[in-house]
Image (tube, rainbow, N blue to C red):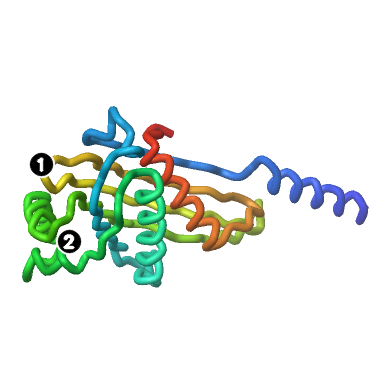
Amino acid sequence: MKTLLLLVLAGLVALYSSGCATVKRGSDVTGLARTSALSGRDLGRLVILTRVLPGEDAPDAAEKEAAALTAATAVLTSLTTASATPRDGLMAALGERSWPDAGDVELAAAARASGVDTVAVLTVTEYVGKLHLGLPALWGTETVFRYQLRVLDAATGSLVLDARRFGMRGGPFACRGLDDLHADFQNDLTELVRGRTAS
């Protein structure tokens, strides 16, 4: 009886740990990049503005903001002909107006005044890892991200890209951590810039 119970338990562990991981993705893309991929474009001098919206799921917002900025800089400078530029000049050109409150017209004008060609605004609304305890799986983890990326051409004021993306991966007995979340986020940004907008 004890052996049978151990075999059943081992079978359940094998069942839940192989092939039962869940992957969910979502994408909504507008702007010029809907029909033509962002990769390969000449974005010139690029400023990336990043923020993580505060909330109960964002206790380490500054850390997550830094990770999101690093990922966005790596993807946009490697897949386009962009040269990442510090945001100081753009912030000075905006004056007392803070960038989250500035509209596209104000951002484009401030970018032109500071010699910037393109502005990318990355807003992360969810960037978390979750641990689930309970039956029938006993435990499991998942990582979730949700963000919006807007890319604005300073010279024309046109919106090159406006994308809202979502990704979740994990499941029973899955062991996923912060490194997995960072990798998933950067991979999703890469797919977006390459024009893989539908999931």
Determine the secondary structure under disc 2: helix
User: Which sits in the foreground, 196 or 119?
Assistant: 119
**Image position, residue 197 (x, y; %):** 37, 34
146 to the left or right of 19: left
Q: Amino acid at mark 1?
A: Thr
Q: Amino acid at mark 2?
A: Pro
Count of numbered circles on the image? 2
Q: Residue at x 7, y 69 (%)?
A: 95
Q: Residue at x 25, y 41 (%)?
A: 161
79 to the left or right of 4: left
Q: Residues within 10 Å of mark 2 (few under 14, many from 20)?
A: few
Q: Residue at x 31, y 63 (%)?
A: 52
Mark sitting on residue 100: 2
Of mark 2 and mark 1, the one earlier in the sequence is 2
Q: Residues within 10 Å of mark 1 (few under 14, many from 20)?
A: few
**Image position, residue 59 (x, y; %):** 39, 71
Q: Residue furthest top?
A: 35
Kindly indicate the quadrant of the structure image that contains residue 66: bottom left
Q: Which-is-in-front pick, marks 2 and 1? A: 1
Mark sitting on residue 156: 1
**Tags 2 and 1 in contact by the CB under 8 Å rule?**
no
Q: Where 188 sits versus 85, above or below?
A: above
Q: Where 174 sits versus 28, above or below?
A: below
